[in-house]
């Protein structure tokens, strides 16, 4: 919990330094704070140094063309007497150093920021009506004690927060001597179209390229890409296609002619998830797909606009690939190590890529990639990169249909044939995802430090193995995934350094669904931990925050696929002890799933416990709660996997 976390990376225009937001544990140990750090780059020597120190923290940093840093923070403005800001404002930190100054604020706060030349575009939450009267209207609502929000569309909440009453809009202004000048609303008619939007600014500062939701009948929506003229606010649809979404990551070519994004097809009962790199002309909207079978995670243009650097899941890693624009079928893997890369930034001369480098056993930190050779070297990091307590091994198995199933096996330091380690199967969420990166939650190395071997497999529906791997599990979650898991678990348990008698299984989100499925379809595990899990699919599909995504795959509520794949229909077959974990603020998998599971388990003789977090979301993020999570999981596993006496952790006593 106390290890500082490097969250982002931005390269200055002159290539001399990187800026990173670093999250660290506050002195009281109950929450985290963020600060901006500078990291020497471009061959310059020196150690990273801290740039900001406010109690509220800072984030969202971008460089201006002059090398100043724009960032967002809810820190009070020292230039305003008795300032006690509760929402994030926009601040500027001069390149030469000194104190940051507030340059823009909005009653609903400022979110993402982009800049080019002296143009600044930012997102802000705005109540319906005239933006100029918003502060008075917000105060009147607060003074009247009104929290009600009236919805006429869908959705009403997202992951862990309620939507409304404000809605996001884009604003533009110009950097002045002390403040952002000529600030104007670019999207007064946006309505709900900019919910969870991504946007970028063309290099000349003339056009904003943004994702734009188009709402459809029956609660559906499609995500288009639009171009907004900064001078006039005029908007034109750039990319739109029936039953497809155009989403981030977004990147505009340095010559201002093209945009790179992700095109995702609508799923259906027999149409699986597919995402592909899409590059389009900004003038005409004409585009095409590139890099087949690589789901875009991060994109960055080469300085001469001839190619895109793409980070994408691949065989339990996330390498960087080079994709030339002129040859859509030609893809070259640039990095060859076992790491996963994110937050790509290319130097102006095109010789180097900077990125956050991490892996299952590597804490994220900044690295420099030589574009000519693909060699990656770590650069000094604002946060330490600790050694992990064990070894990481790659294993694979052949499933019953002949498909190769691979995964990572974390082994504790002293595991051997003479002292085999107890075993934990950890099933990833998604389900369209992969175990290839460092996890700040669900940290396998903590379990290794307590003596467990942890298998992190990529079964069907995992990314990085081609479209066929996703197709084979689509609409067949439980049976197909279990067959894949059984195959690779058999291989792991055949090792002489693993104790095949003392085994448990764990999963969160989709992994929690599979944990529940295994509980009703297997008796090989001594204990199962099910976190933020799906239990009754018919109930879940109508109460989650984005129901249409699940109903596309499973059909209308009550259809056959729900009954075939819902874990709750195998309640009478569950005999394995279960630890149920859920946060009340989880809107992706609503608390009703855990409450129903817990009630159903009360009607059986299964030894079960329910770890409940009233103030947490899908992940359990507060430091104290995360500690309680690990302590309770370890105590439960010690009881049922290791055969020790149950000891209630002090953190939940």
Image (cartoon, helix red, strand yellow):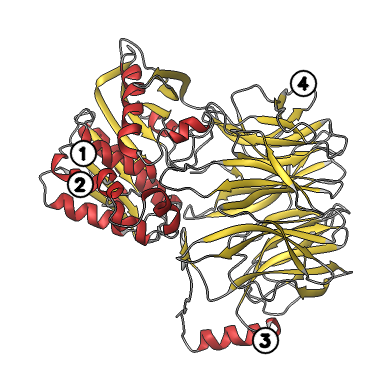
The image shows residue 28 at horizontal and vertical percentages of: 49, 55
Dot 3 crowding, Cα within 10 Å, few <14, some 14–19, many 20+: few
Eye-nearest disc, 4 or 2: 2
Query: Where residue 264 is drawn, which disc sits there?
Result: none
Query: Where residue 569 is drawn, which disc sits there?
Result: 2
The image shows residue 145 at horizontal and vertical percentages of: 46, 85
Q: Residue at x 72, y 64 (%)?
A: 122
Lower position in the chain sequence, tag 4 or tag 2: 4
- In the rendered structure, the answer to whether residue 73 lies left or right of residue 180 reads left
Residue annotated with mark 1? 520
Residue annotated with mark 3? 133
- The Cα atoms of the two marked residues, 4 and 3, are separated by 56 Å
Dot 4 crowding, Cα within 10 Å, few <14, some 14–19, many 20+: few
Q: Does the residue at mark 1 contact the one at mark 2 (Cβ under 8 Å)?
A: yes
Residue 333 in which image quadrant: top right
Lower position in the chain sequence, tag 3 or tag 2: 3
- The Cα atoms of the two marked residues, 3 and 1, are separated by 57 Å
The image shows residue 55 at horizontal and vertical percentages of: 62, 61
Residue 633 in which image quadrant: top left
Residue annotated with mark 4? 373
- The front one of 255 and 224 is 224
């Amino acid at each position: 919990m106390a290890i500082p976390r490097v969250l982002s990376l931005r390269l200055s225009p002159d290539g001399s330094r990187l800026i990173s937001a670093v999250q660290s544990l506050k002195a009281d140990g109950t929450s985290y704070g963020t600060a901006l750090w500078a990291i020497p780059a471009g061959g310059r020597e020196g150690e990273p140094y801290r740039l900001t120190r406010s109690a509220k923290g800072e984030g969202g940093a971008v460089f201006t063309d002059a090398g100043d840093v724009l960032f967002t923070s809810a820190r009070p403005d020292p230039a305003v007497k008795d300032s006690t800001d509760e929402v994030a404002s926009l601040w500027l930190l001069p390149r030469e150093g000194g104190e940051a100054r507030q340059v823009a604020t909005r009653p609903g706060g400022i979110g993402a920021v982009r800049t080019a030349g002296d143009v600044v575009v930012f997102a802000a939450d705005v109540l319906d009506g005239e933006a100029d009267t918003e502060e008075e209207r917000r105060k009147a609502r607060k003074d009247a004690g009104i929290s009600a929000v009236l919805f006429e569309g869908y959705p009403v909440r997202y992951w862990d927060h309620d939507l409304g009453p404000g809605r996001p809009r884009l604003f533009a202004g110009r950097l002045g001597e002390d403040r952002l000048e000529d600030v104007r609303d670019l999207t007064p008619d946006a309505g709900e179209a900019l919910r969870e939007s991504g946007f970028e600014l063309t290099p000349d500062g003339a056009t904003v390229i943004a994702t734009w939701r188009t709402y459809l009948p029956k609660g559906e929506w499609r995500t288009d890409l639009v171009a907004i003229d900064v001078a006039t606010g005029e908007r034109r649809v750039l990319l739109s296609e029936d039953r497809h979404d155009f989403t981030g990551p977004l990147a505009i070519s340095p010559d201002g002619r093209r945009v790179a994004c992700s095109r995702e097809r609508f799923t259906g009962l027999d149409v699986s998830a597919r995402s592909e790199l899409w590059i389009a002309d900004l003038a005409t909207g004409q585009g095409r797909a590139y890099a087949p079978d690589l789901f875009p995670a991060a994109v960055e243009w080469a300085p001469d606009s001839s190619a895109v650097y793409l980070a994408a899941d691949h065989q339990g890693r996330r390498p960087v690939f080079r994709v030339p624009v002129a040859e859509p079928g030609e893809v070259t893997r640039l990095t060859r190590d076992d790491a996963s890369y994110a937050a790509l930034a290319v130097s102006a001369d095109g010789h180097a890529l900077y990125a956050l480098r991490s892996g299952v056993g590597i804490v994220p930190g900044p690295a420099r990639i030589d574009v000519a050779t693909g060699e990656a070297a770590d650069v000094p990091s604002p946060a330490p990169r600790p050694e992990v307590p064990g070894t990481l091994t790659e294993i694979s198995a052949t499933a019953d249909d002949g498909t190769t199933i691979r995964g990572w096996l974390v082994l504790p330091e002293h595991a051997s044939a003479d002292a085999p380690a107890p075993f934990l199967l950890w099933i990833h969420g998604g389900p369209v995802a992969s175990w290839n990166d460092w996890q700040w939650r669900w940290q396998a190395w903590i379990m290794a430090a307590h003596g467990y071997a942890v298998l992190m497999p990529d079964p069907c529906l995992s990314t990085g193995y081609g479209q066929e791997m996703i197709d084979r599990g689509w609409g067949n979650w439980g049976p197909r995934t279990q067959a894949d898991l059984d195959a690779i678990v058999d291989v792991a348990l055949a090792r002489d350094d693993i104790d095949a008698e003392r085994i448990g299984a764990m999963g969160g989100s989709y992994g929690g669904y599979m944990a529940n499925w295994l509980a009703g379809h297997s008796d090989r595990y001594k204990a199962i931990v099910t976190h933020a899990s799906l239990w009754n699919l018919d109930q879940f599909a109508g109460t989650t925050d984005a129901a249409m995504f699940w109903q596309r795959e499973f059909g209308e509520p009550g259809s056959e696929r729900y009954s075939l794949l819902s874990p709750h229909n195998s309640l009478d077959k569950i005999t394995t002890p279960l630890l149920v974990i859920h946060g009340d603020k989880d809107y992706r998998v609503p608390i009703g799933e855990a409450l129903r599971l817990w009630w159903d388990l009360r009607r059986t003789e299964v030894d079960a416990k329910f770890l409940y977090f009233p103030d947490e979301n899908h992940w359990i993020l507060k430091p104290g709660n995360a500690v309680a999570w690990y302590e309770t999981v370890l105590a439960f596993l010690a009881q049922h996997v290791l055969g020790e006496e149950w000891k209630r952790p002090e953190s939940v006593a």
